[in-house]
């Protein structure tokens, strides 16, 4: 089966004629403590996930320089994580796909339109705490949190990913 990927004008990578966007998120755990790194979604008119918490990451965007999909995903995730939580993934070679979990499809409303995004989760164990300084207006309040204590505040799709990771 041929892969039917396309890149929109804004660089967002999608699949099947734009019916599904592609996204990547980082499940970062501090010292195997079950404390995971979450960001809070900023308010944006017409966005369903306002003020919910989620893993850092987002839509996969092509920078026009990566030569294959794997590299595009990695560069895009590293860029999002750097601006959302000030974590440099370049220095972390232990980043890996979340084993045993198929991609999760998020269904949500943004800009007045129903959208679907296939989310690819990646995991990383972080041994040192770092300053969470967001340079992105779409998120704020990055914090290490135990998912069960904030379960109702986590976006539905990120809840599924957290459940696979924790259990």
Image (tube, rainbow, N blue to C red):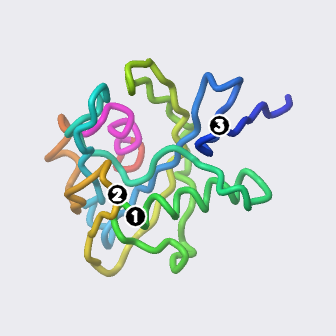
Q: 10 Å neighbourhood of mark 3: few (<14), some, or many (≥20)?
A: few
Point 65% across, 37% down: residue: 8
Residue for badge 1 = 83
User: At numbered mark 3, what does the secondary structure look like: helix, strand or loop?
Assistant: loop
Residue at mark 1 to residue at mark 2: CA–CA distance = 6 Å
Point 36% across, 60% down: residue: 84
User: At numbered mark 2, what does the secondary structure look like: helix, strand or loop?
Assistant: loop
Point 51% across, 44% down: residue: 59
Residue at mark 2 to residue at mark 3: CA–CA distance = 21 Å
Is 79 above or below relative to 21? below
Residue 158 horizontal/vertical position (percent)? 36, 40
Residue 67 horizontal/vertical position (percent)? 79, 58
Sooner in the amino-acid sequence: mark 3 or mark 1: 3
Tags 1 and 2 in contact by the CB under 8 Å rule?
yes
Q: Which mark identifies residue 126?
A: none
Count the marks: how many?
Answer: 3
Sooner in the amino-acid sequence: mark 1 or mark 2: 1
Residue at mark 3 to residue at mark 1: CA–CA distance = 22 Å
Residue for badge 3 = 8
Query: In this picture, which residue range is highlighted in magenta?
Result: 154-163
Query: In the rendered structure, does residue 113 fall within the stretch colored magenta?
Result: no
Toward the viewer: 120 or 108?
108
Image position of 79 (left or right of 149): right
Q: 10 Å neighbourhood of mark 1: few (<14), some, or many (≥20)?
A: some
Query: In the rendered structure, does residue 161 fall within the stretch colored magenta?
Result: yes
Residue for badge 2 = 136
Is 48 above or below relative to 32? above
Question: Which one is closest to the eye, mark 3 or mark 1?
Answer: 3
Identify the image quadrant of residue 96: bottom right
């Amino acid at each position: 089966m041929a892969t039917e990927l396309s890149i929109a004008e804004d660089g967002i990578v999608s699949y099947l004629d734009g019916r599904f966007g592609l996204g990547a998120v980082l499940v970062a755990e501090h010292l195997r403590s079950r404390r995971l790194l979450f960001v809070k979604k900023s308010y944006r008119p017409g966005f369903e996930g306002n003020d919910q918490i989620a893993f850092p990451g987002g839509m996969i965007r092509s920078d026009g320089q990566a030569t294959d999909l794997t590299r595009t995903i990695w560069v895009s995730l590293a860029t999002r994580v750097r601006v959302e939580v000030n974590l440099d993934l370049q220095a972390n070679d232990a980043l890996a796909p979340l084993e045993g979990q198929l991609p999760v499809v998020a269904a949500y409303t943004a800009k007045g339109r129903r959208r679907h995004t296939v989310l690819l989760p990646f995991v990383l164990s972080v041994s040192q705490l770092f300053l969470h300084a967001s340079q992105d207006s779409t998120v704020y309040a990055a914090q290490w949190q135990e998912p069960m204590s904030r379960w109702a505040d986590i976006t539905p799709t990120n809840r599924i990913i957290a459940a696979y990771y924790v259990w």
